Image (cartoon, helix red, strand yellow):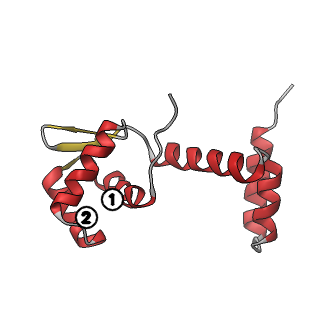
């Protein structure tokens, strides 16, 4: 089973969770009110929905994530590349680099990442 889909508002919620976990649900509701303007009921609804989808667990009123930020980001990128670029990573990178100026440091870092991905004999 892949990483569960997390929608925009849920992702903003997860950012708070990942920053603070493990966190009591009452404290999480306060944080969501402060940062997102959510009511306590909205926060508890999102906790329940994400728990049902396997994104987090709520045990004894303590909430912890079951998927990491990195897993969610990778899943989103995979979906974007598949949907918008017919699964072509080179097409995605070409589109990305045409729309943004990269610094020399960013280019060097990307080159290092590509070099690390190359299959070694």
**Residue at the extreme top:** 121
Residue 63: % across, % down: 23, 44
Dot 1 falls on a residue whose secondary structure is helix
**Side of 72 where 50 appears, left or right:** left
Residue drawn where x is 73% and y is 48% of the image: 113
**Side of 103 where 62 appears, left or right:** left
Residue drawn where x is 20% and y is 52% of the image: 44
Residue 24: % across, % down: 16, 49
Dot 2 falls on a residue whose secondary structure is helix
Residue drawn where x is 28% and y is 54% of the image: 20
> For mark 2, does the 10 Å Cα neighbourhood hold few (<14), some (14 to 19), or many (20 or more) residues?
many
The disc at residue 16 is: 1
Query: How far is disc 1 from disc 2 in space, using C-alphas?
Result: 8 Å
Picture mark count: 2
Task: Give the label, 1 or 2, closer to the camera.
Answer: 2
| Among numbered discs 1 and 2, the one appearing first in the sequence | 1
Task: Identify the residue position indicated by label 2 in the image.
Answer: 32
> For mark 1, does the 10 Å Cα neighbourhood hold few (<14), some (14 to 19), or many (20 or more) residues?
some
The disc at residue 68 is: none
Residue 75: % across, % down: 57, 44
Residue 97: % across, % down: 79, 65
The quadrant in which residue 84 appears is bottom right
């Amino acid at each position: 089973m892949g990483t569960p889909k997390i929608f925009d508002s849920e992702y903003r919620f997860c950012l708070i969770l990942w920053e603070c976990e493990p966190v009591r649900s009452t404290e999480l509701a306060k944080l969501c009110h402060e940062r997102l303007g959510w009511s306590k009921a909205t926060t508890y609804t999102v906790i329940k929905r994400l728990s049902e989808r396997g994104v987090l667990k709520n045990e004894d009123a303590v909430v912890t994530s079951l998927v990491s930020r990195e897993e969610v980001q990778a899943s989103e990128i995979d979906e974007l590349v598949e949907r918008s670029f017919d699964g072509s990573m080179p097409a995605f990178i070409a589109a990305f680099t045409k729309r943004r100026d990269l610094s020399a440091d960013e280019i060097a870092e990307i080159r290092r990442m590509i070099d690390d991905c190359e299959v070694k004999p």
